[in-house]
Image (cartoon, rainbow, N blue to C red):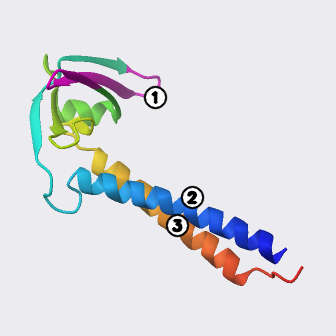
Amino acid sequence: MKKLLKIVYILGILFWSSFLVYGLARMVAYNGFGNHYSFTCKSADNFTVTEEANGNLKISYSYDVSGKVYSNDERISGELFREKVGSVSALPICYNNTYPSLSYIQEVNLAVSREKTGVVVSIIFLTFISVIYLYAKRDY
């Protein structure tokens, strides 16, 4: 039983640590910890705004960088979108020059807060797994 608990503990630590590292790397790429990467802002080539049943908006957009087309979609509160962006005929987006697949809507940068949430959830689960493992009866 001790070996099984140790294997499950190690697998849990590896799983949630990978999410932690992934979230931290994306936060750095979105300039969540400083200004390491440069972003270029332009209008999206194509975009659609679809209102969902709960009042949120699903915004799908695509943009071209050096002949390659990237696409992304964001879900955002309708009120927040209208307040920050308004009703526009062109959707302003910003993309990372080093990693052009990382983009966000110019006035509404939800990417950093989304990655912060992932980092916090990973830390909570890592702590939970460690506390359970340290205080578990392993003598069964």
Q: Nearer the viewer, mark 2 or mark 1?
A: 2
Q: Magenta part of the protein: which range?
A: 51-70
Rendered-image quadrant of the C terminus: bottom right
Identify residue type, mark 1. Answer: Asn
- Residue carrying label 1: 54
Residue 114 within the segment the image draws in magenta = no
What residue is shown at x 72% (from left), y 73% (from top)? 6
How packed mark 3 is, by other alpha carbons closer than 10 Å (few <14, some 14-19, many 20 or more), is few
Q: Residue 65 occupies which quadrant of the picture?
A: top left
The earlier-in-sequence mark between 1 and 3 is: 1
Secondary structure, mark 2, is helix
Identify residue type, mark 3. Answer: Ile
Q: Nearer the viewer, residue 82 or 45?
A: 45
Label 3 and label 2: CA atoms lie apart by 13 Å
Identify residue type, mark 2. Answer: Phe
How packed mark 2 is, by other alpha carbons closer than 10 Å (few <14, some 14-19, many 20 or more), is some
| Image side of residue 70 versus residue 35, left or right | right
From what the image shows, is residue 136 above or below residue 21?
A: below
Q: Nearer the viewer, mark 1 or mark 3?
A: 3
Determine which of the numbered discs, if any, sits on residue 124 in the image.
3
The earlier-in-sequence mark between 3 and 2 is: 2
